[in-house]
Image: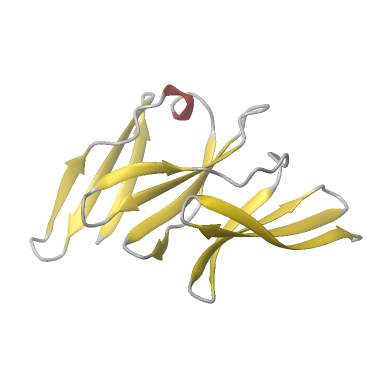
């Protein structure tokens, strides 16, 4: 499976590729206007338990980071809660550690701090913090 998200003229469109049928299929997408009008950075997908997770960082003051999952079997997008962090300016990475989905957050430039959060169903647990890394 291959997913392609296209943004054009303020609209978001998702296409899913099927290697079995050698074709692309247009699908519905998240219909929330906050994702349509600002510059965004999308993470690569991280596959975990039948879901392709990715983060969206919206580059607008106070907009923050968002986490979405594409459920492969049902072809549905669902938003997931983001860890309760006040670090909207941070850099975020999704990682798999010991068969669990984690979010790694680096924040506080130029004296970086690092947080590692583990997803337990729809809740997040902060499991590791490294304060003030001086460059």
Q: Nearer the viewer, residue 128 or 70?
A: 128
**Along the horizontal axis of the image, is 13 left or right of 47?**
left
> Residue 52 location in percent, x, y?
37, 57
- Please provide percent x and percent y for residue 100: 50, 68
Q: For this view, does 30 lie left or right of residue 64?
A: left
Q: Quadrant of residue 48?
A: bottom left
Horizontally, residue 125 falls left or right of residue 135, namely left
Q: Nearer the viewer, residue 78 or 124?
A: 124
Placement of 127 over or under 89, stated as above or below: below
Q: Examine the rendered structure and indicate whether residue 83 appears above or below residue 31.
A: below
Which residue appears at 53% of the width and 37% of the height? 40
Q: Residue furthest left?
A: 21
Closest to the observer, 53 or 43: 53
For the view shown, which residue lies furthest in the right direction?
134
Q: How many marks?
A: 0
Which image quarter holds the N terminus?
A: bottom left
Q: Position of residue 15 (x, y in %)?
A: 24, 46
Name the residue: 53% across, 27% down: 38
Q: Quadrant of the C terminus?
A: bottom right
Point 50% across, 52% down: residue:
43
Picture quarter containing residue 112?
bottom right
Q: Is residue 58 left or right of 90 when viewed as pictured?
A: left
Q: Position of residue 73 (x, y in %)?
A: 21, 57
């Amino acid at each position: 499976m291959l997913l392609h998200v296209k943004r054009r003229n303020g609209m978001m469109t998702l296409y899913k590729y099927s290697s079995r049928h050698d074709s692309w299929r247009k699908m519905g997408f998240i219909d929330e206007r906050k994702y349509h009008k600002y510059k965004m950075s999308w993470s690569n997908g991280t596959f975990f338990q039948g879901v392709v997770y990715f983060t969206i960082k919206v580059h607008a003051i106070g907009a923050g980071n968002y986490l979405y999952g594409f459920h492969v079997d049902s072809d549905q997008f669902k938003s997931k809660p983001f860890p309760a962090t006040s670090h909207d300016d941070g850099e975020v990475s999704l990682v798999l550690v010991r068969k669990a989905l984690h979010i790694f957050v680096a924040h506080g430039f130029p004296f970086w701090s690092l947080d590692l959060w583990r997803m337990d169903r729809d809740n997040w647990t902060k499991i590791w913090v490294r304060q003030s890394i001086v460059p």
